[in-house]
Amino acid sequence: MNKFKSYIKESYIELLEKVSWPKWNQLQQSTIITILSTIFITLIIWAMDFISSKTLEFIYSIFK
């Protein structure tokens, strides 16, 4: 049990003193970049899916 208490105490100290947490501005910028990147990649995948779907529909319609 002492090892567990020591682990928790050391982890807490490490989080407070050794970890460099981002400033609020940096956190907001990173969040905005992540959201915009996710939207951009989603749109690219949607466009690829839409184009391939329409292309296959066209090819299938030729051979009906």
Image (cartoon, helix red, strand yellow):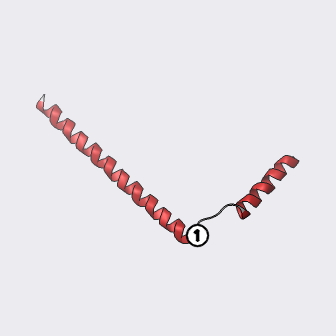
Question: Within the image, what quadrant is residue 49 found in?
Answer: top left
Q: Residue at x 17, y 32 (%)?
A: 60
Q: Position of residue 30 (x, y in %)?
A: 49, 63
Q: Which residue is mark 1?
A: 23
Q: Looking at the image, is 62 positioned above or below residue 13?
A: above
Total marks in image: 1
Q: Secondary structure at mark 1?
A: loop
Q: Position of residue 21 (x, y in %)?
A: 63, 64
Left/right placement of residue 53 relative to residue 17 reads left
> Residue lying farthest right?
2
Question: Within the image, what quadrant is residue 53 found in?
Answer: top left
Left/right placement of residue 39 relative to residue 29 reads left
Work out which quarter of the rendered image holds the C terminus and state it: top left
Q: Looking at the image, is 18 positioned above or below residue 7?
A: below
Crowding at label 1, few (<14), some or many (≥20) Cα neighbours within 10 Å? Answer: few
Question: Within the image, what quadrant is residue 35 found in?
Answer: bottom left
Q: Position of residue 42 (x, y in %)?
A: 36, 51
Q: Residue at x 45, y 64 (%)?
A: 32
| In the foreground, 62 or 34 | 34
Say whether residue 32 is visible: yes
Q: Looking at the image, is 54 positioned above or below residue 19?
A: above
| In the foreground, 20 or 39 | 20
> Residue lying farthest bottom?
25
| In the foreground, 61 or 29 | 29
Q: Residue at x 44, y 61 (%)?
A: 33
Left/right placement of residue 37 relative to residue 18 reads left
